[in-house]
Amino acid sequence: MNKDKSKDGQEEIIGVVCTFYAELEPFLEELKNREYEKIVRKHLCFYRTIVGNKQVIIFMSGVGAVSSSCNLQLGIDEFDFTRILVSGIAGGISPDVHPGDLVIPRQWADHTYGYLSSGKDDRDPIFETLPDFPEPFGPVYHYWQMLYRDPLDYSKKEFRIWFGVDDELLEKARLTSLNPRLELRKIGDRDPVFHIGGNGVTGCLFANNYSYRQHLYRWFKADVTDMESQCLCHTAYLNNIPVLIVRAVSDYAGTEDGEHNLLPQNSRSASNNAFRTVWDIIERI
């Protein structure tokens, strides 16, 4: 079978990352209708199939920064992905984002990477903040990450708060958002809405605090938060692989009056919406 090629002539091999089983389940349902193979490497099971003459390799990375990053790297080393798509759920931050919506940010930051100060007013934090940095949340100062990208010259350092997604994949997501045949599920009585091109944030904490949600919206202008996406973008960046993150909103990252967090009830429908969006993008590549 002839397979599609990426821009540099390499065979197109798309890695699809889900972080926990509810996100993986709709992909496994899809695989029941097509030929696929299971490939076990170390502690992971990869599901390989062909979509439009492209190899698509689907796997579950696990929840959180360490599991998601190291397991994505395992997949990259094993299969040499040409693109990476992430499918899953997230908590809503922006007041314009509601459960069921699809959020596909342009860039991601880690809101829990930084400095925990002494809380005393008479001393500055060790990591001095700059004018364009987000303000601290109490004693917690957000900070950039320092990267070494040249293995032969450690004096070459790069400082980043934001890790971006691929522009070409983001444009394909815009086209997908116009597809009336996606069959997205409602959560409640509201039709899902796409939010494409904004900001997302990731942290080591499951965010369920309304004051902190307001803080993340005010200073990061974030639409959603999760526990993996910035880490996955970071890993893709270091490997120079185009990446796109698709997050369906399952709940709010902290509630106020009139809102309810119904993550267990919403996770399957939200995961299905992310799956259908990602599958349509795969078919457009």
Image (tube, rainbow, N blue to C red):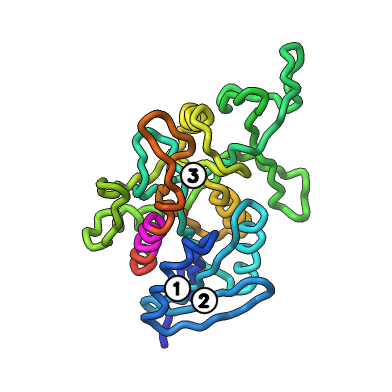
The dominant secondary structure in magenta is helix
103 lies left or right of 132: left
For residue 107, the mark is: 3
Residue range in magenta is 269-278
Residue 177 location in percent, x, y? 29, 54
Q: Is residue 285 above or below residue 197?
A: below
Q: Residue at x 39, y 62 (%)?
A: 275
Determine the secondary structure under disc 1: helix
273 drawn magenta: yes
In the image, what residue type sits under mark 1?
Leu
Quarter of image, res 205? top right
What crowding class fits label 1: few (fewer than 14 Cα within 10 Å), some (14-19), or many (20 or more)? Answer: some
In the image, what residue type sits under mark 2?
Tyr
The extreme top residue here reads 122
The C terminus lies in which quarter of the figure?
bottom left
The N terminus lies in which quarter of the figure?
bottom left
Of residue 62 and residue 188, the one placed in the foreground of this image is 188
Which residue corresponds to mark 2? 47
44 drawn magenta: no
Q: Are marks 2 and 1 in contact (CB under 8 Å)?
A: yes
Q: Is residue 23 above or below residue 186?
A: below
